[in-house]
Amino acid sequence: MIPAILAAAPWLGTAAAFVRSPLGKVLGIGVLSVSLLGYGYMKGAENAAAKCDAAALRVRIETLERDLSIAKAAELQAVAQEAAAEARQTTLNERLSSYESDLGATPPACLLTDDDVERLRNLTR
């Protein structure tokens, strides 16, 4: 079968003879060496890129964890502010109710006095 192939393509015999020659062996080893060096270089570059990506992901995770802790602290602060606002609202409502009851105790024909106006202004202070 090989002689039939060589008969159909005589250049294959010439190529085979070149590969078996000392120059062909040196060139073959050179091509193999360059191929191995290229493969090693590409694997190294791929490994370096993977390490860089891993480092970037670690930084991203740390940033997201900090953002999460900041959001939790903001939530606690918002809850505390809401509770303080509700307490202030309750106090103001009580003071307003007291003021209304004091005004209701006076006869309807009476006008507001300066003290009443000043007390009304001071309700929210």
Image: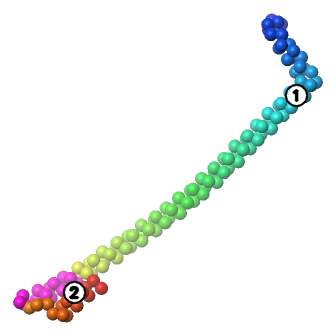
**Image quadrant occupied by the C terminus:** bottom left
Q: Secondary structure at mark 1?
A: helix
User: Which residue lies under the disc numbered 1?
Assistant: 27
Dot 2 crowding, Cα within 10 Å, few <14, some 14–19, many 20+: some
Q: Residue at x 18, y 86 (%)?
A: 99
Mark 2 residue type: Leu
Mark 1 residue type: Leu
Q: Quadrant of residue 72?
A: bottom left
Question: Residue 9 appears at what percent x and percent y?
Answer: 80, 10
Locate residue 105 relative to residue 70 in the image: left or right: left
Question: Residue 112 appears at what percent x and percent y?
Answer: 14, 90
- Magenta highlight range: 95-109
Residue 2 visible in the current orientation: no
Q: Residue at x 88, y 28 (%)?
A: 27
Q: Quadrant of residue 42?
A: top right
Q: In the image shown, does 76 or 9 lie closer to the viewer?
A: 9
Q: In the image shown, does 66 or 23 lie closer to the viewer?
A: 23
Question: Residue 85 appears at what percent x and percent y?
Answer: 32, 75
User: Which residue lies under the disc numbered 2?
Assistant: 120
Q: Earlier in the sequence, mark 2 or mark 1?
A: 1
Locate residue 23 relative to residue 5 in the image: left or right: right
Tell me if residue 34 is in the magenta stretch: no
Q: Residue at x 86, y 13 (%)?
A: 13
Instruction: Name above or below for residue 52 compared with residue 101.
Output: above
**Image quadrant occupied by the N terminus:** top right
Instruction: Name above or below for residue 86 compared with residue 25.
Output: below
